[in-house]
Amino acid sequence: MQNTVDSLDEAVLGPYLEAHVAGFSGLRNIEKFADGQSNPTFKVSASSGEYVLRRQPPGELLKSAHAVDREFRVMRALSGSDVPVAEVFHLCEDRDVIGSMFYVMEFCDGRIFWDSTIPEVSKSDRTAIYFEMNRVLAALHQVNLEETGLSDFGKPGSYFERQYTRWSSQYRASETRPIEAMEALMQWLGENLPEDDGRVSLVHGDYRLDNMIFHPSEPRVIALLDWELSTLGHPFADVGYQCMQLRMPDSKGGISGLRGRNLEELGIPSEEEYVAKYCERTGIDGIDNFGFYVAFSFFRLAAIIQGVAKRALDGNASNKNAAAMGEFVEPMAELALEAI
């Protein structure tokens, strides 16, 4: 069997894992997870237990994209901290093994909620789940960078300027058609980047409900996933990104929003309540100019979605529905313009 975006060569991978992952033995099965848009992820079953393998997609990649080595490093650094992460076992930087870099981590048996209304739980648990996300976010932004060895994990300062340059460039590299709302948004953001206020923390970069594994029965996060976009940056970027879900309409494209929903009836905190709780946990008075952080988050998401759609056109997307994701770039840009 040859390695592809959907499958791995068990005859090659089995002996490699036995030689490089402590205690690994008896590879039985490899199954690709159907969900997720970025790095192909597989459940690896063996006599010694169950594992997860996460790899870069094959083919030519945009610069700095699909950084599974950074994911591996940050999860290893956060082990034992107040930020729940999966235990990581091995990083393979030799692309000749399966055709791209990959790492192996523990399989966390729990719940992933894809629908933002979380219909499968009670109202009280729903409230607890949203405030648990808030707790983990505050803990993430208070990680001691020196103690965890992450003080060099990114460039401190000028975060939004650097991010604007990066995602504008990546959007241009994957652009497939002109989108008027995206052009207007990029112009406005470029002219309204906030002055650097000196805040620097570890940021996740894709902090949302479906990037977390919750305990099988408790409203408690047991693993925060998908650290591909993590770096040193401005904490308010993560807060704005999390709050996009409250402003985003529900859709059938894999993006589940809460716009127009009765949050009180659902037991989901409002944006004001969520931000206030975050500020309380991090010891700050409030977040000025919050609309900018939300708009910037929509811009980043739109650029990411455009990249997913372009990979689908190029034939190396991880998710079978990736091509349709391009339809959501314009609505994301319009929501950003609304936020500002």
Image (cartoon, grey):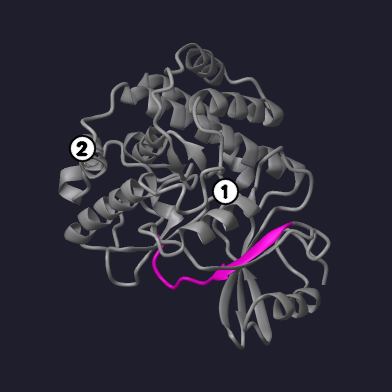
- Quadrant (top left, top right, bottom left, bottom right) of the C terminus: top left
Residue under label 2, please give it.
276
Q: Looking at the image, which is closer to me, 313 or 53?
A: 53
Label 2–label 1 contact, CB within 8 A: no
Per the rendering, the mark at residue 228 is: 1
Q: Could you tell me which residue is drawn at 69 percent across and 44 percent down?
A: 312
Secondary structure category for the residue under label 2: helix
Q: Amino acid at mark 1?
A: Glu
Per the rendering, the mark at residue 116 is: none
When asked about the image quadrant of residue 73, the answer is bottom right
x, y percentage for residue 1?
82, 72
Number of other residues with Cα within 10 Å of mark 1, as a class: few under 14, some 14 to 19, many 20 or more: many
x, y percentage for residue 63?
71, 37
Residue 248 visible in the snapshot? no
Q: Is residue 63 left or right of residue 326?
A: right
In this rendering, the count of numbered labels is: 2
Q: Could you tell me which residue is drawn at 39 percent across and 60 percent down?
A: 81
Number of other residues with Cα within 10 Å of mark 2, as a class: few under 14, some 14 to 19, many 20 or more: some
Q: Amino acid at mark 2?
A: Ala
Q: What is the residue that sits farthest to the front in this orientation?
A: 146
The image shows residue 12, relative to residue 210, as above or below, that is below
Could you tell which of marks 2 and 1 lies nearer the N-terminus?
1
Which residues make up the magenta segment? 101-112
The image shows residue 32, relative to residue 189, as above or below, that is below
